[in-house]
């Protein structure tokens, strides 16, 4: 090998050795950081005072985002858990809502309990958690930790709170609240409109993959003793919000064909108001 070829080979080896740590998201000697994949999300919690429905919706560039983000119980409340997520925040929030705790107090209590145990042998800091809680009256509180992946934040509106991370910017949550407040019709459609607003504002900077939605009201789901009005998941789709809208519209159309409302379920999911 001549001197020029040898120099080129040595340069290639050195360049690769410097680049290799970057493939794992850290520099030589740096402490391992949480993997941002799987943590980016934008979600909304909402309440309809006319029907008493509670609901939530979410979109993310991960497979099956509904599996662990949205939590809801009729007559109790709803919650969303995301960013550098501790999924147990959802069940914890519902348990505290059952005790009648205020959403802001629930946020504080759950954060105070978090021992920051890490995940998979790596840091998974509680300072990166993001979650929101809403009670049956539509009162809510939300938290975005200072280490949630940017852009991250939350915005409240009338009977709604929007939150997200790894977003294009603040316009995402601003648009979500605006669309929720200005859209007429069933809660399910207002939640979808909020996601559409978030996506129009730039959405998750990594793109789209899955979306989910849940709406609850005591004994207002199909069949006997079912509190789930609607539970939908689009787990893997290039346009998950578009597909979610199709499913919601199909559900609302079905509800609108009912002849009369069941007791306590007037207007739920676009159904009849007369009994």
Image (cartoon, rainbow, N blue to C red):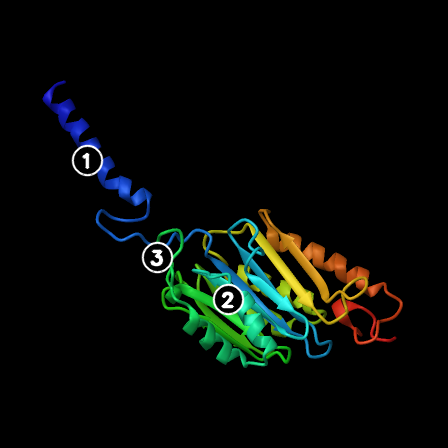
Q: Residue furthest left?
A: 3
Query: In the figure, 12 relative to 136: above or below?
Result: above
Residue on which disc 3 sits: 123
* Place of residue 86 in the rendered image (x, y in percent of width and height, measured from the top left): 47, 61
Viewed as shown, does residue 209 lie left or right of 263?
Answer: left
Tell me the residue that label 2 is attached to.
89
Upstream in the sequence, badge 3 or badge 2? 2
Vertical arrangement, residue 234 with respect to residue 49, above or below: above
Give the mark toward the camera: 1 or 3.
3
Q: Residue 152 got which mark?
A: none
Q: Secondary structure at mark 1?
A: helix
Using the image, determine if residue 197 lies above or below residue 77.
Answer: above
**Percent coordinates x, y for residue 95 in the rendering:** 57, 72
The number of callouts visible is 3
Q: Residues within 10 Å of mark 1 (few under 14, many from 20)?
A: few
Tell which of 220 and 100 is nearer to you. Answer: 100
Residue 161 visible somewhere in the drawing: no
Task: Let me know if residue 253 appears in the view.
Answer: yes
| Element type where label 3 sits in the image | loop
- The quadrant of the image that shows the N terminus is top left
Q: Which residue is mark 1?
A: 14
- Marks 1 and 3 sit apart, C-alpha to C-alpha, by 29 Å
Give the x, y percent position of residue 144: 43, 69
Residue 194: x and y in percent read 59, 66
Q: Residue at x 61, y 74 (%)?
A: 181
Marks 2/1: CA–CA distance = 45 Å
Provide the secondary structure element on which disc 2 rests. Answer: helix
Q: Residue at x 19, y 27 (%)?
A: 9
Q: Nearer the viewer, residue 52 or 94?
A: 94
**Residue that appears at 58% across and 56% down:** 66
Q: Which residue occupies 62% across, 67% down?
A: 72
């Amino acid at each position: 090998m001549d001197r020029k070829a040898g120099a080129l080979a040595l340069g290639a080896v050195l360049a690769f050795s410097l680049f290799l740590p970057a493939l794992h998201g850290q520099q030589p000697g740096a402490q391992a950081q949480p993997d941002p994949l799987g943590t980016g999300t934008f979600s909304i919690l909402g309440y309809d005072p006319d029907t008493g429905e509670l609901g939530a919706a979410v979109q993310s560039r991960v497979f099956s985002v509904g599996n662990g983000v949205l939590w809801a119980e009729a007559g109790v409340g709803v919650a969303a858990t995301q960013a550098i997520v501790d999924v147990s925040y959802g069940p914890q929030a519902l348990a505290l809502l059952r005790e009648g705790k205020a959403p802001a107090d629930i946020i504080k209590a759950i954060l105070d309990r978090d021992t920051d145990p890490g995940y998979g042998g790596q840091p998974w800091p509680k300072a990166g958690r993001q979650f929101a809680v809403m009670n049956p009256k539509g009162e809510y509180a939300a938290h975005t930790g200072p280490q949630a992946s940017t852009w991250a934040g939350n915005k409240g509106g009338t009977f709604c709170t929007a939150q997200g991370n790894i977003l294009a910017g603040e316009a995402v949550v601003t648009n979500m609240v605006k669309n929720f407040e200005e859209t007429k019709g069933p809660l399910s459609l207002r939640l979808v409109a909020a996601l559409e607003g978030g996506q129009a504002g730039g959405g998750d900077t990594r793109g789209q993959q899955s979306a989910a939605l849940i709406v609850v009201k005591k004994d207002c789901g199909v069949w006997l003793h079912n509190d789930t009005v609607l539970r939908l998941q689009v787990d893997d789709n290039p346009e998950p919000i578009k597909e979610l809208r199709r499913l919601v519209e199909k559900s609302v159309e079905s509800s609108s064909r009912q002849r009369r409302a069941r007791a306590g379920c007037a207007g739920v999911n676009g159904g009849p108001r007369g009994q």
